[in-house]
Amino acid sequence: MNLPNKLTILRIVMIPVFVAVFFISAIPYNFIISAVIFALAAATDFLDGYIARKYNLVTNLGKFLDPIADKVLVSTALIIMLVPIGGVLIMPYYASIAVAIILARELIVSGFRIVAASKNVIMAADQAGKWKTFITDIAILVLLIGADINPETYSVMNIVGLALLGVATVLTIISGVECMVKNRAVLSDKKEETK
């Protein structure tokens, strides 16, 4: 198993650690510690892809695991932050709309990728999708850190984090629509003519 795949598996292993620390309120600054774990896990997403491309270490296992690890990490973080912990509400109930949109987009794009793969078509990540991932990660970090620094629902960090989540949601919609428009031929049942 090569280094990029080991980093991807490390990211998967870090997800339950992140969740455990998040929920164990007996740990001082558990939200900040979980933010650090999340940041390290998110960094492996960039690092494994960079190493795989630079040193030509791209494998089928990596192509399969990497997007799953990324989506499970972000989805887990967004979902658990909707749960009030020890009287601290990291995201208000209306943020669940943004979370639902982000998760729906991930499922739709994953479906497109499965169909594309069955037709031997590679769907490259677009710029809006990359920015969406980056800003979503930053929003999660800001919200987690803010929950420990100032646990009030309407603290400055909470408002900044929710604003970033709003931006990420807009980028999610844009990148999802772009993906569907650019790759609509993937869903066609027409057989390509051989020349």
Image (cartoon, rainbow, N blue to C red):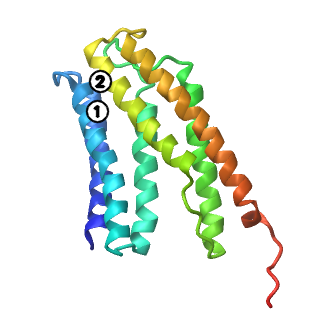
Q: Quadrant of residue 181?
A: bottom right
Residue occupying the point 16% across, 21% down: 28
26 vs 22, left or right, is left
N-terminal of the pair, mark 2 or mark 1, is 1
Disc 1 residue type?
Ala
Distance in Å between CA atoms under marks 2 and 1: 7 Å
The residue to which callout 1 is attached is 35
Residue occupying the point 24% across, 27% down: 32
Rendered-image quadrant of the N terminus: bottom left
Disc 2 residue type?
Ile
Count of numbered tags:
2
The residue to which callout 2 is attached is 145
What is the crowding at mark 1: few (fewer than 14 residues within 10 Å), some, or many (at least 20)?
Answer: many
Q: Which mark is residue 108?
A: none
Q: Is residue 163 visible?
A: yes
For residue 94, above or below residue 8: above
Q: Check contact, mark 2 vs mark 1: CB within 8 A.
A: yes
Residue 9 position, x and y percent, is 30, 59
The one nearer the camera, 34 or 54, is 54
Residue 185 position, x and y percent, is 76, 65
The one nearer the camera, 14 or 57, is 57
